[in-house]
Amino acid sequence: MLKKDLLKLIENIEDEASVDEVLSKSDFAKSLLQSGLTLNAFKEKMNEPEFKSFLDSIKDKHFEKALETWKSNNLQTIINDEVLKATGKKKTPEQLKIEELEKRMLESEAKAKKAERIAKYKDVLAEKKIPMEMIEYFLTDDDETTMARIDNFKTFVDDIVNTSVKEKIASGSYTPPGENGSGDFTVDDIAKMMM
């Protein structure tokens, strides 16, 4: 059927009318029906071995191309993953590098926090006359716990010192220091203390 013939067929059809009905009455549609090219005829052809073989070969070509595309896009990644699993590494070099960088970052943050906490308690230790080297024994992540440890230490040391001093004074064995360690002050000792 030529285009001009088709246009002649549809030129008198109203806008809301069905084109199928007009076309089904045409010579073209009648020739298609006579040739047997209908859906039912196609379904019947599917039972014929030669026709089925022809369709299978077309499907095989399509699936083969799809498989090749999938392989080129995904197969290498799957192989790499399986090799890593088999070798026990299980992680790519990029993943290992990321983990190393994360570990370094966390360590740096922890060091910075620790330095900040040490600076915070430096004055407290100085005020309580506790050597700065002891900060490691007191320092925790919790402010209340750190302060409690510092206060407890100060209380224990003061109690020990007071008890020891009281014992020395009570026993009468305390001798005030002098220049020669005899316990007697000389005029020179007093003069040196005043300077």
Image: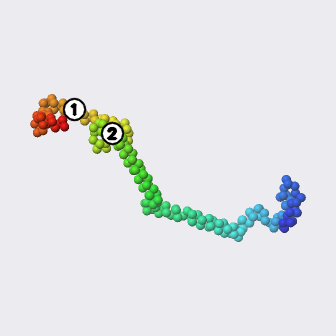
What is the C-alpha distance between the residues marked 2 and 1?
24 Å
Earlier residue among tags 2 and 1: 2
From the viewer's side, name the closer residue of 123 and 194.
194
- Asked whether the viewer can see residue 38, the reply is yes
Name the residue rendered at 86%, 63% in the picture: 7
Q: How many C-alpha atoms fall within 10 Å of the one at disc 1: few (<14), some, or many (≥20)?
A: few
Mark 1 lies on a secondary structure that is: helix
Quadrant into which the N terminus falls:
bottom right
Residue extending farthest top: 170
From the viewer's side, name the closer residue of 193 and 97.
193
The total of numbered circles placed on residues is 2
The tag on residue 69 is: none
On screen, residue 86 versus residue 167, left or right, reads right
Give the x, y percent position of residue 159. Answer: 24, 32
**Image quarter for residue 26?**
bottom right
Residue type, numbered disc 1: Asn
Quadrant into which the C terminus falls:
top left
On screen, residue 169 versus residue 21, left or right, reads left
Give the x, y percent position of residue 57. Answer: 66, 69
Residue linked to disc 1 = 162
* Tag 2–tag 1 contact (CB < 8 Å): no
Residue type, numbered disc 2: Asp
Name the residue rendered at 27%, 41% in the picture: 131
Give the x, y percent position of residue 169. Answer: 16, 30
On screen, residue 79 versus residue 17, left or right, reads left
Mark 2 lies on a secondary structure that is: helix
**Image quarter for residue 21?**
bottom right
From the viewer's side, name the closer residue of 70 and 14.
14
Residue linked to disc 2 = 123
Give the x, y percent position of residue 194. Answer: 18, 35
